[in-house]
Image (tube, helix red, strand yellow):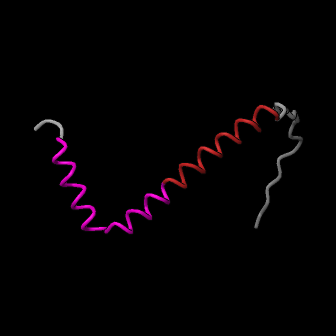
Amino acid sequence: MGSLSIWHWLIVLVIVMLIFGTKKLRNIGADLGGAVRGFKDGMREGGEHAADAPQVTGKTIEGEVKEKTEHKA
């Protein structure tokens, strides 16, 4: 009941190929690779833009409520 050996993984791979077919698996792999590539590009671009952008700090607006009004709909 230990970890799976190489033979177990090969059997699982053959079953998956029989269920989905090689063309569908190839399309899934291409889509997944494109998504990973897009994520890496986005992270790279986000890091460049974050270094160039000025730091924005929040502003506190102080005020006081003079009178409480009730709105009836």
Where is residue 2? Give x, y as percent.
Answer: 13, 35
Q: Quadrant of the N terminus?
A: top left
In this rendering, the answer to whether 46 lies above or below 35 is above
Q: Quadrant of the C terminus?
A: bottom right
Looking at the image, residue 16 sits to the left or right of residue 7; the answer is: right
Foreground residue among 73 and 56: 56
Q: Main secondary structure of the magenta part?
A: helix
- Residue beneath the point at 17% across and 48% down: 8
In this rendering, the answer to whether 41 lies above or below 60 is below
Instruction: Please identify the quarter of the rendering in which residue 65 is found.
Output: top right
Where is residue 51? Give x, y as percent.
Answer: 77, 31
| Total numbered labels | 0
Look at the image and give the residue range highlighted in magenta: 5-32
Instruction: Please identify the quarter of the rendering in which residue 59 is found.
Output: top right
Residue 24 magenta: yes
Where is residue 11? Give x, y as percent.
Answer: 18, 54
- Residue beneath the point at 74% across and 36% down: 48
In this rendering, the answer to whether 71 lies above or below 67 is below
In this rendering, the answer to whether 10 lies above or below 66 is below
Residue 16 magenta: yes
Foreground residue among 62 and 15: 15
Foreground residue among 5 and 49: 5
- Residue beneath the point at 77% across and 38% down: 49
